Image (cartoon, helix red, strand yellow):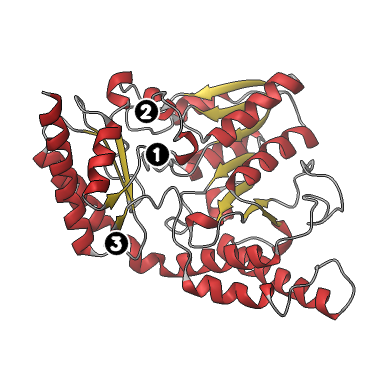
Amino acid sequence: MIYLDAAATAPVRREVLEAMWPALTQDFGNPSSHHTVGEAALRALDYARGKAAEVLGCRPGEIIFTSGGTESNNLAIKGIALAAPRGRHIVTSAVEHPSVLEAVDYLVRFHGFAATRVPVDAAGTVRVDALEAALREDTTLCMVMYANNEVGTIQHIARIGALCRAAGVPFHTDAVQAAGWLDLDVSALGVDALSVSGHKLGAPKGCGLLYVAGRLPLEPVLHGGGQERGRRSGTENVAGAVAVATALALADGDRAADVPRLTGYRDYLIDTVLRELPGTVLTGHRTERLPASASFCFPGTSGEAVLLELERRGVVCSSGSACAADSDEASAVLLAMGIDRAVAQTAVRLTFTAGVKESEIALAARSVVAAVKEVQALRR
């Protein structure tokens, strides 16, 4: 089997499991307990916080451990917007993850906020001029994802961050897909909050983190024991914290070597598919995209039929976001990019980890071509 659905989840790295093991066995205590076992757990938690902070270029105290990207996004959006709003207006893009869009919708429905969704171009790139125009005196928060989970397009986060800073608007980015592939230095990006999910990086599901600048007030979403400096109550998942911090550090350390190699694999896959299958639509930006992400629409086919044919040939991939896998609706991201609804329903996404082999990518490219041709032949 060739696994090309890493954007949905990546396999757990052995180094991460080894780093977690002490927190699951000898240092299993509650980090809030004032005894030796609890203090050992607290040291492990502090170690994880410091390790993650090194990658993000922030202070350890600005790291909040969460259950993953969805919680991190919800905490950032609701927590910043409700803590000390300068107004009741929020700006985001048309291609955000559902955990962002639905958190914004919650603020609109229950707290009287107004929201502006900034459009994107045909490549899925946020129109920075439109975003600048959308910022108002009463804008209390702006959110734009770093890299899209469906089409891989990378946004101009540093430019947007500079605009928000000049306007005095806090800026959050969902970096769940970008982590491990792109620079996450929060100062260079100009972000006030940034979300990471562990299972995209080689940690187990159910662990993540949120960076929030120390100067920003944050209203907690979870209330209770006051853990994480009162910002996220609940007994900390120490092993999960160690896992996400270790996976983040490993991926960041490997980035310089992995990105050029995987970019070459990605481009080979894209070039082969576009050359061998005329009429194929590449979704996302041709070059300003994640190095391990290729996505297409195959007009005149069924995306589901192509996926089934690929799995029959030993290639596992998806049609887009795993969070919308049970929906029959066309992707909102593709529709926002101006892709026809019928074409959008033929989408296929291939995303891979750093461990993929060149021979596997070559075989996957041949398999995509053969699978699409098989489905086209059956539909004639």
Give how far across and how far down residue 169 sits, in percent: 65, 35
Task: Count neighbours of disc 1 (C-alpha within 10 A) and say few if under 14, some if 14 to 19, many if 20 or more.
Answer: many
* Category of crowding for the residue at label 3, using alpha-carbon neighbours closer than 10 angstroms: few (below 14), some (14–19), many (at least 20): few
Residue 184 shows in this picture: no
Q: Position of residue 56 (x, y in %)?
A: 58, 60
Q: Amino acid at mark 1?
A: Glu
Q: Residue at x 58, y 34 (%)?
A: 100
Amino acid at the residue labelled 2: Leu
Task: Say if residue 345 shows up in the picture.
Answer: yes
Quadrant holding the N terminus: bottom left
Separation of residues labelled 3 and 2 (CA atoms): 27 Å
User: Residue at 52% across / 66% down in the picture?
Assistant: 247
Judge from the rendering whether residue 177 lies leftward or rightward of residue 46; answer left or right.
left
Name the residue carrying label 1: 150
Q: Seen from this angle, which residue lies furthest right?
A: 34
Question: Which one is in front, 299 or 130?
Answer: 299
Q: Is residue 213 above or below residue 329?
A: below
Residue 260's tag is 3
Residue 107 found in image quarter: top right
Q: Which element carries disc 1, helix, strand or loop?
A: loop
244 to 143, vertically: above or below: below
Which three-letter amino acid code belongs to the residue tagged 3? Pro
Q: Is residue 297 above or below residue 231?
A: above
Are the residues tagged 1 and 2 within 8 Å (C-beta)? yes
Q: Gap between marks 1 and 2, in whole Å?
A: 9 Å
Q: Which residue is mark 2?
A: 334
